[in-house]
Image (cartoon, rainbow, N blue to C red):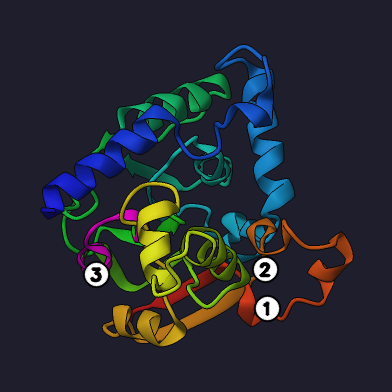
Amino acid sequence: MSNESINHLVKEYWEAQPCGTETDIFGDLPKYSKEWFEIIENHRYDVEPFIHSIAQFTRYRGKRVLEIGVGAGTDHLQWARAGVDLYGIDLTNAGIEITQRRLDMYGLKSNLKRVDAEILPFEDNSFDVVYSWGVIHHSENPQTIVSEIKRVLKPNGEFIGMFYNRRSLAGIVAWLKFALLKGKPWRSIFYVLYHYNESIGTKAYTNAELRNIFKDFNTLKVTPLVTVSDYNYLPKFLKYVIPPSFGYYSGIQAKIN
């Protein structure tokens, strides 16, 4: 399957339902209503409270920030509230529309474009910060996107984001469901996540692989994060004893000189 067709299928998947807009979150609330947006926002930070500690939105007031993959616009709204010079891109029309409506509701602004992040339409040395939470690993060519991020970052610029961790409880659960219980134990966790987790082509990485992807950055900090996906099938109390290294999310902070 060609890169173009993979990314086309990824686009179709998220076009139908941008991340964070699942109907079980907001029930029968009117789409695009203030209540609809607020339920989406509350849910995101209820299940992923660590986003704020990794992103630290308010630290970057006055800086030029690009978000890759705006989705339902929840994090994008936090960047706008923080008073940054804000830009956002998404592979889908749906993500751009929802995010624009959300910003309009609060009288906030961003420069939004629908583009594929594998070719960023920005000059070299354009941004102080590039942010992307759980998006780049859906692309056919994550390394290409990371190279583009480095190109558009200013000297002393920073990437902040999240990639999936392959050696996680969530990865093991997916393997049990789509490999062992299907009578195909030879399928790897990589294969299972690629074919059965969200859009086709989803990837998850070891720490060594992340270091390689960000090899052209001067510093890299990887923060393991335990998520609902890791403990969803376990007794509730066990979520407090899961080692962070088994968490499904890898928070990323990478800088260039």
Q: Quadrant of residue 9?
A: top left
* Residue position marked by numbered label 2 in the rendering: 226
Q: Nearer the viewer, residue 201 or 74?
A: 201
In the image, which residues are magenta?
137-147
Marks 1 and 3, how far apart in space? 25 Å
Q: Residue furthest right?
A: 237
Q: Residues within 10 Å of mark 2 (few under 14, many from 20)?
A: many
Residue drawn at x 72%, y 62% is 231
* Residue position marked by numbered label 1 in the rendering: 244
Q: Secondary structure at mark 2?
A: loop
Tell whether position 222 is magenta: no
| Residue 233 image position (x, y, % from top left) | 73, 58
In the rendered image, which quarter contains the C terminus?
bottom left
Marks 1 and 2, how far apart in space? 6 Å
Q: Residues within 10 Å of mark 3 (few under 14, many from 20)?
A: some
| Residue 32 image position (x, y, % from top left) | 55, 17
* Residue position marked by numbered label 3 in the rendering: 143
Q: Residue furthest top?
A: 30
> Which residue type does callout 3 highlight?
Gln
| Residue 251 image position (x, y, % from top left) | 54, 70
| Majority SS type along the magenta span | helix
Q: Is residue 233 left or right of residue 110?
A: right
Residue drawn at x 39%, y 75% is 186
